[in-house]
Image: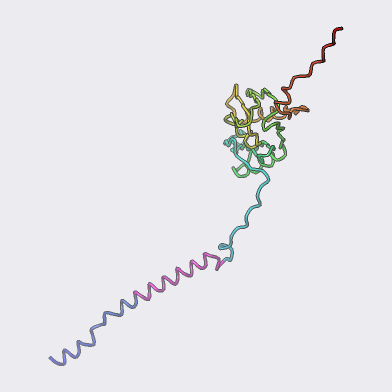
Amino acid sequence: MAEEQATTKPVVKPTTKPAAKSSSASGQRNSRNNDRDSKGQGGRRGGRGRKRPERAPREYEQKILDLARVTRVTAGGKRMSFRCALIIGDKKGQVGLGVAKGADVQIAIEKAYKQAKKKVITVPLVNETIPHPVTVKFGSALVMLKPAPSGTGLKSGGAMRMVLEFAGVPNVVSKIMNSNNKINIAKATFKAIEQLRVVEGAGQSKKQSAVPAKMPAEAKTE
């Protein structure tokens, strides 16, 4: 019996070895994950972890007025593209409108920005408003602009409000008469701005303009 017990003792395996293997395997996995993270941060290709250079600020602020997907029928079939109407301005008297098409949305926006930059116009202002009322028709769009006293703000909506806001007009009253087409309304607004003229002496205050002219003295009767 003693011999049998002696032979069975070496056969028993310690229970600590599998735990050691599992811990070593988990350590290897952690080291691999760390290596992958370091490579993903720029260790392998050397460019992923670097920050992209910031774009230079643009001269004008921009906003999309209308973005639509349009198709053109050709001999080979339909050709799809994107049309972008973009308004730019510095909110200090300069504003522009550009309409362009492109195979991609970003391409259309870039082309519209370049177009709008070439067509920038200056808005004449007198006493923080436009100098005189004007009514213009472009296509089916009929728009009206009227001067307003300081403190009124922008009394307008839709495409007209966007154009006047980017132009930096503080006080004006406007009305869209006849159309729902944003591009036609914006073009009519630009046409109205181009017709504005500043008259000499228009910047005088109301008190000065309201002073009556002096009447000649009556002749004395003998």
Q: Quadrant of residue 172?
A: top right
Q: Is residue 204 visible?
A: yes
Q: Main secondary structure of the magenta part?
A: helix
Please state the horizontal and vertical placement of residue 191, each as a whole percent of the image: 70, 28
Q: Position of residue 24 (x, y in %)?
A: 37, 76
Q: Is residue 210 left or right of residue 65?
A: right
Q: Nearer the viewer, residue 200 or 35?
A: 200
Which of the image's four quarters has the C terminus?
top right
Q: What residue lies at 58% left-to-right and 37% top-to-bottom?
A: 67
The residue located at (46%, 69%) in the rendering is 34
Residue at screen point 64% across, 24% down: 144
Q: Is residue 77 visible?
A: no
Query: Residue 109, relative to residue 6: is it above or below?
Result: above
Give the image quarter of residue 7: bottom left
**Residue 41 shown in magenta:** yes
The magenta region covers: 22-44
Image spot of residue 215 (x, y percent): 79, 16
Q: In what quadrant of the picture does the N terminus appear?
A: bottom left
Looking at the rendered structure, the number of numbered marks drawn on it comes to 0
Farthest residue, direction right: 222
